[in-house]
Amino acid sequence: MSEHLSEITALLIEGNFNEIAGITHSALDTGISADKILDQGLMPGMDHIGIEFKAGRVFVPEVLRSAKAMQESMDIIRPILAETGSEPVGRIVLGTVKGDLHDIGKNLVGMMCEGAGFEVIDLGKNVDPQEFVDAMNELQPDILGMSAMLTTTMMSMDRTIQALQDAGIREHVIVLVGGAPVNQDFADRIGADGYASNAASAADLAKKMVNQKRS
Ligand code: B12
């Protein structure tokens, strides 16, 4: 049983997106649950990739291959998780801010949050402040997550928070920000509710803040 899970972890780390679907199916066939595949197969692999990337031992192409492998496996287990799982932990609307086309980090944050039990709605990249406001009104998420990778686009986070304020809905949502040029100090200055430096801590923070809000 655990052989399948460690194989899934290894394939994800290798970025072997061709074989991971087959092993995911056979893991399910042997009775391993979808949430176990996520928690004990995929997540440890993605955590490992995150650590190695930070340490400069793996590079963007490898991260992309691993993310694609995670996606292949997620595509199989997602419907099962949705069927068997309890209510989602919460709803997250995620986007890369206006003027910015970097989406690898945001996609990883989305995947990790999905793995942590959130319903994730991804608005994509180059997202205008008004698009965030419209999504807020339409989807009423618990969390709004913004990503920026350029020093020139960071201020679009500030403008989005301002737009939420102008629309009178700032207090209705937890705003999380992240991306390489962003830090806690910047998050505090623009009045965001939280900042995380990587996808795994983003998911942890999202969970913590939703629980705090509800208690
Ligand atoms: C890949 C890449 C690209 C790709 C993007 C492909 C894509 N689909 O994303 C392409 C080639 C398109 C690109 C274009 C450009 N890029 Co570029 N790019 C990079 C590169 C090499 C990697 C970025 C990346 O994906 N990192 C990997 C992910 C996993 O890390 P991450 O994004 O930081 O995300 C993690 C955390 O930040 C956090 N996080 C991210 N988002 C969020 C959100 C929330 C809510 C939370 C809580 C956490 C969180 O969790 C993530 C996962 O752990 C970086 C250099 C580098 N080594 O970082 C330059 C870099 C970001 N690019 C740079 C530049 C200048 C550009 C261009 C302007 C180049 C040009 N002259 O055309 C254009 C801009 C295009 C645009 N308008 O956006 C500069 C930015 C400099 C600056 N300080 O502003 C960098 C730093 C390179 C450099 N050293 O000069 N780029």
Image: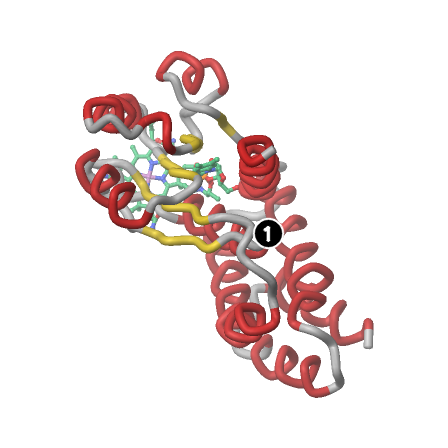
Judge from the rendering whether residue 208 lies leftward or rightward of residue 7; answer left or right: left
| Nearer to the camera, 66 or 95 | 95
Looking at the image, in which quadrant does ligand 1 appear? top left
Q: Which residue lies furthest to the front in this view?
A: 215
Q: State the image quarter where residue 29 is shown.
A: bottom right
Q: Residues within 10 Å of mark 1 (few under 14, many from 20)?
A: many
Q: In this view, does 163 lie above or below 18?
A: above
Q: Where is residue 97 in the image (x, y as percent from the top left)?
A: 27, 36
Q: Where is residue 149 in the image (x, y as percent from the top left)?
A: 36, 33
Could you say whether the residue bearing mark 1 is in a helix, strand or loop?
Answer: loop
Q: Is residue 101 above or below residue 83?
A: above
Judge from the rendering whether residue 14 lies leftward or rightward of residue 67; answer left or right: right
Q: Is residue 172 visible?
A: yes
User: In what quadrant of the picture does the N terminus appear?
Assistant: bottom right
Q: Where is residue 90 in the image (x, y as percent from the top left)?
A: 50, 48
- Determine the residue positioned at 32% across, 27% down: 170
Q: Is residue 56 visible?
A: no
Q: State the image quarter where residue 199 is shown.
A: top right
- Determine the residue positioned at 51% across, 52% down: 118
Amino acid type of the residue that numbered disc 1 sits on in the rendered structure = Ala
User: In what quadrant of the picture does the C terminus appear?
Assistant: top right
Q: Position of residue 14 (x, y in %)?
A: 62, 64
- Determine the residue positioned at 22% across, 36% down: 98
Q: Mark 1 points at which residue?
A: 116
Q: Is mark 1 within 8 Å of ligand 1?
A: no
| Nearer to the camera, 205 or 101 | 205
- Determine the residue positioned at 56% across, 64% down: 15
Q: Residue furthest right?
A: 2
Colouring scheme, one of rainbow, by chain, secondary structure, one colour: secondary structure
Judge from the rendering whether residue 10 lies leftward or rightward of residue 137; answer left or right: right
| Nearer to the camera, 146 or 209 | 209
Tell me how many marks there are: 1
